[in-house]
Amino acid sequence: MRKKQFKAESQKLLDMMINSIYTHKEIFLRELISNASDAIDKLYFRSLTDTDVHVSRGDYAINIIIDKEEKTLTISDNGCGMTKEELENNLGTIAKSGSFDFKRTNEGGEDVDIIGQFGVGFYSAFMVADRITVRSKPYGSNEATVWESEGVSGYTTDTCDKSTFGTEIILHIKEDTDDERYSEFLDDYRIRSLVKKYSDYIRYPIKMAVEKSRKKEGTDGEYEKYTEIETLNSMIPLWKRPASEVTDEEYKSFYTEKFFDYEAPAKVITQKSEGTATYTALLFIPSHVPFNYYTKDYEKGLELYSSGVMIMDKCPDLLPDYFGFVKGLVDSADLSLNISREMLQHDRQLKVMAKAIEKKIKSELEKMMENDREKYEKFFDAFGIQLKYGVYSDYGMHKDTLQDLLLFRSSNDRKYVSLKEYTSSLKEEQKTIYYAAGETIDKIELLPQVEAVKSRGFEVLYLTDDVDEFALKIIGKYADCDFKNVTAEALDLSSDEEKEALKKENESAEAMLGAMKDAIGKVSAVKFTASLGKHPVCLSSEGELSVEMEKILKKMPGVDENAPKASVVLEINMNHPIAEKLKSLHETDAEKLGKYARILYAEACLIGGVSIENPAELTELISELMV
């Protein structure tokens, strides 16, 4: 046998195929199994029109044999097989794909779903093998051929004896090194896990002889070894079965095993699309937050399959960040793959699929909110904050997609309410959505402004997540209604007569209020108000940045003293006895007025949940006035 050189432009190309294209060495098994599946597909397709092919579909199989003593791993099939010429063309010419040629010449044929297309997958086996032997016999032929190569040095071909049709590929596994443990690919557990990971849904059974032990009959504790043939793959993907034929228990079992969860999913979503982008999707909304979901270690993404063969464990481009909690997979025969089949080309097709999946998830969540409110509220408790961040991120690009999925606790029995539900029950003259922000609902309800707004019959949304108020600022308007923080200085629910009386009160006390502002030194203004009921004081804010937003910004890492600050106003209840006391002090004791001003500011801070910078000063002032 004379050694022949590969019909490529240079040996360097093959070296690149072996060492550079594939990221993970384990990929070789996926490639060889896919090639075996393609070979069976070709023979099956031929049997549809050729009456001389007498092979039942149930007889097709792919077999894996591990020989630890000889250090070989064999992958064989009973597919179409190859002649000597085909072996030289397909294996002796790099990037020559027999599968691609077959697919191209049989377009539109029934049941043609060939995986291979580039003709380089076979060479990935050289990542783990220092010698590869291929024995192949075409169906209906009496002649078999052996092809053998040690890599870039070239290959040999010769006739050989082979009793069955099809192809077997024998890999002589490399010796272990300090950096690489190649012997792992002679471990049946490792091979089983790789088949499950990448080739579980190959349509033909993948079988392997596994050595086991059992107690020998008639002995006391003696064991004997025996070999059992195991089928390693599931073959029929759950997502390719009609949804009406899959039980809830089957979906639950698939989800918990596939995505390592201990609870059933809150929602199962199936989607089948044909046309611009042809794919099948099986998606799951978890019923609880994964332990690492809100950490940098969490990776979003859907499993991506091409004709049942896994291409990517997590394809992040198929899910927007705000739906990153969704688990599942997408299977498409029309993917534009790169040469190694490890990464997806970023093309229009992928974007079309991602957009359709996004719309489907949103639609299913809306249905859950409408038809199973209890389940949706449980989902929102787990992932609602992610939806709110989705509204706020990217300068509000996604607000229209997400705003109707948001829920907020309400002053009406603290129940969850959506923006749509809030606006649908507005009073006829109301064009405002009122809200208040704070650390907890209990603290929010202690705000004097909340009590004032509720007393006038208006519903108030309670914002307790850091992102809430920022998200509402991004939304801007909803159903032609403005959002209004009840602690904003501009909020005024008084009648015209009350407003006129308040204006006069502030004008007559201008000098006193100015003196109090100077004594406090941390507020933009001190004003009288008539909206506090029994409460003496409160803090409000001028402009877009509220007191609560300032508190949140201060908690962010890297924020310095130059960070934006709220313009704070101290409001004093003009109907409270304290107002008359202040007026009296203004006339008789300016120094004591300043002390009262600082105490009232501290009191307002405590009510509003703002930390007091100098608690010692406050206690001294109180003690002094008490004495």
Image (cartoon, rainbow, N blue to C red):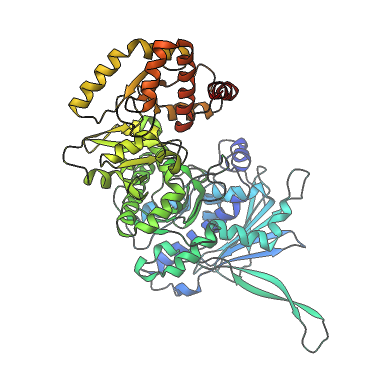
Residue 123 point in image, percent of width and height: 59, 48
Is residue 191 left or right of 599 when viewed as pictured?
Answer: right
Q: Is residue 258 above or below residue 326?
A: below
Residue at figure coordinates x 37%, y 71% from the top left: 245
Which of the 4 quarters of the picture holds residue 391?
Answer: top left
Identify the residue at the far left of this view: 428
Q: Residue at x 47, y 43 (%)?
A: 316
Query: 355 or 178: which is nearer to us?
Result: 355
Residue 170's x, y, as percent? 65, 59
Up/down of 494 relative to 162, above or below: above
Q: Is residue 607 visible?
A: yes
Report the front residue among 310 and 589.
Answer: 589
Q: Nearer the viewer, residue 417 or 300?
A: 417
- Name the residue at the bottom extreme: 218
Using the rendered view, name the quadrant where residue 614 is placed: top right
The relative height of residue 308 versus residue 514 in the rendered view (above or below) is below
Q: Position of residue 395 (x, y in %)?
A: 37, 29
The number of numbered discs placed on residues in the rendered structure image is 0
Examine the rendered structure and indicate whether residue 353 appears above or below residue 482.
below
Q: For this rendering, which residue is in front, 299 or 117?
A: 299
The percent position of residue 208, horizontal first and vertical second, equals: 62, 68
Does any portion of residue 269 appear in the rendered image?
A: no
Q: Quadrant of the C terminus?
A: top right
